[in-house]
Image: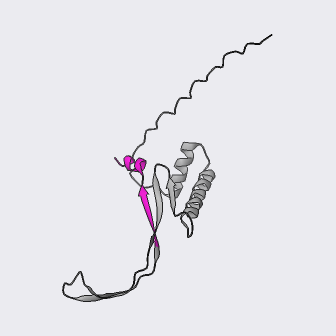
Amino acid sequence: MAVKKAPATTAAPAAAPAARKVTALKDKYTKTQILNEIAENTGLTRKEVNAVLEELGIVIERHIKKRAVGEFTLPGLLKIKTIKKPAQKARKNVPNPFRPGETMDVAAKPATTRLKVLPLKKLKDMTL
């Protein structure tokens, strides 16, 4: 004899948490104040929040150090990129932009790696 299964019940989707009211600050926060604020709002301890921030720093370092990917994205907030600038040769008798008619010598510059931090859409929208 075949046993009939009871129809599956679908759970109601969990309601999204209400958006928090974000207030503007009059003074910039110190590291301790930032840790306390995040700990208070997330229910984590200060030590746990500090460990998360330290680990984030390590992850960023692993992305941007020499011979690495060279790019790190904190989703929605910012993108950190490394830009390799080639070496510049020394140049002689270059027109001086500050004294027309005079020439100057420009020293050689070694190749360097620059860091560029780009704000992403969510961060740009926060400033409005």
Q: Residue furthest right?
A: 1
The residue located at (58%, 24%) in the rendering is: 12
Q: Where is residue 5 in the image (x, y as percent from the top left)?
A: 72, 15
Looking at the image, residue 39 lies above or below residue 108: above
Q: Which residue lies furthest to the left in this view?
A: 101
Let me know if residue 81 is in the magenta part.
no
Which contiguous range is marked in magenta? 113-128
Q: In which quarter of the image is the N terminus?
A: top right
The residue located at (60%, 53%) in the rendering is: 52
Left or right, 101 with reference to 87? left
Say if residue 44 shows up in the picture. Answer: yes
The residue located at (56%, 27%) in the rendering is: 13
Circle count: 0
Q: Quadrant of residue 92?
A: bottom left
Say if residue 33 shows up in the picture. Answer: no
Q: In which quarter of the image is residue 42?
A: top right
Q: Which of 54 and 39 is in front in this view?
A: 54
Left or right, 25 with reference to 72? left
Q: Which of 94 and 59 is in front in this view?
A: 94
Q: Position of residue 47 (x, y in %)?
A: 63, 53
Looking at the image, residue 17 lies above or below residue 34: above
Looking at the image, residue 48 lies above or below residue 60: above
Q: Position of residue 15 (x, y in %)?
A: 53, 29
Check the image and tell me how it is coloured. one colour
Q: Residue furthest front?
A: 1
Left or right, 112 with reference to 93? right
Left or right, 21 with reference to 67? left
The residue located at (66%, 16%) in the rendering is: 7
Looking at the image, residue 2 lies above or below residue 76: above
Q: Position of residue 29 (x, y in %)?
A: 46, 55
